[in-house]
Every structure is written in C-alpha cells, then in structure tokens.
Amino acid sequence: MTEQATLDAKFAAEQKQADVDHHKPTAGAMTNHVLSNHLVMNIKLHQISWFIKGANAENYKAVLKQTISENNQWFDKIAEQLLDENELPSSTMKEYSDYTMLEENGENKYLNAEEMLATVVNDLVTDNMFVTRAIKLAEKEDRPYFQQVLVELLGWNNHQIRIYQALLGKTATEGLGDDEDDEDFD
C-alpha cells in the first residue's frame, strides 16, 4: 500500500467513525458540533466588529475584541480536550461547515448595531443547546474531566450572553424564552 493510500484509508476510517458517532451521538461527536460552532462564531464576531456602526461602535468593538480573543482560547481548549479524550477534533473547513449549527450571512454586515449584537446572543444560545447535550453525554460516558471543561464553557457562554444582553439593554435571559412569567403566584 502506498503512503497516499494509507493516508486515504485512515481518513476514510475517521470519516466513517464520525458518521457513526453523529448518528448515535457521543460526547466527542457533540463536542465537535460545539467546536465547529465556535469557529463559525469567530468569523461572525469579526464580521460584526468590522461593520458595526453607530454612536457606541467603538465600545462595542472593544467588547467584541475581548470576546473574539476568549472565543479563540476556547476553540483551542475544546480541540485539546477532544484530543485528551482520544477523540479527533474537526480540522477541515468541510467538517466545520458540516457540523456547525450557526449560519453565516453576508447580509448581516448591513444590520444595525442592535441586530448585530442580537445575532451573538442567538448564536450563544444555539451553542448552549449542544454544550448541554455534550455535558450530559460526557456524564453518561463517565468522562468527568471532559464534562468539567464543557461545564466551564457553558459558564463562559452564559457570561457572554449576559454581556451582550446588557449591551442591548436587557437582563441575561430577557426575551430568550427562559424568563419566568412575571405573574404573582399565591
């Protein structure tokens, strides 16, 4: 077997296993969705920081720059954790594109500042759905440190949601469907 044939066979086996893992989700497969979400989130955060306008644009850019930096750290931490758990992190644009649940849109650069910031909140809420699933799967698979890292990521995501909601003049969960009714219960 030639070296290229060996490489092709290894990658084919990896892709076959990834397909199996995504149809009967594992913590590793679910975390690859999270990894892919954070790569796409990085692109979207850059788009916003480049095109946001308005009286508070420079303040927003400072917050976005911090989020981009921290998100990049999380991207690496998630990938490293996958490797530590003997999992293969996604490593191609095709894989990231296939596994992300976030949507890019070139038209977003024309949104107003509030609409742009709202997309960050929505992306983090979407990512949290996958993070919480990965946490449950890691617990089920008895992978405590994997679970711990994912719980820390969930905390970071929630903190970012609160920051961006505050920039929009909202409380952390306002308008996200998690608000309890304001009715008085007797």
Image (cartoon, rainbow, N blue to C red):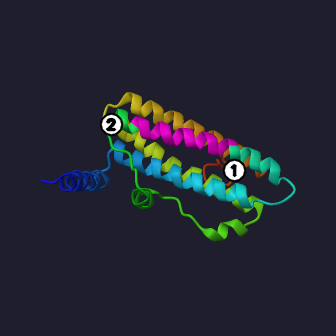
Question: Does the segment drawn in magenta span residue 33?
Answer: no
Residue 67 is a magenta residue: yes
Does residue 173 appear to the left or right of 74 in the view shown?
right
Q: Nearer the viewer, residue 102 or 137?
A: 102
Per the image, label 2 sits on a secondary structure element best described as helix
Q: Residue under label 2, please give it.
A: 140
| Residue occupied by mark 1 | 174
Q: Is residue 160 above or below residue 49?
A: above
Categorize mark 1 by other alpha carbons within 10 Å: few (<14), some (14-19), many (20+): some
Badge 2 amino acid: Lys
The residue furthest left is 1
Q: Position of residue 43 (x, y in %)?
A: 59, 56
Residue 29: image x %, image y %?
35, 48
Q: Earlier in the sequence, mark 2 or mark 1?
A: 2
Quadrant assignment for the C terminus: top right
Question: Magenta segment range?
Answer: 66-81
CB-based contact (under 8 Å), mark 2 and mark 1: no
Q: Is residue 43 left or right of residue 113?
A: left
Q: Closer to us: mark 2 or mark 1?
A: 2
Looking at the rendered structure, the secondary structure element under dot 1 is loop
- The percent coordinates of residue 113 (x first, y second) are 76, 60
Q: Amino acid at mark 1?
A: Glu
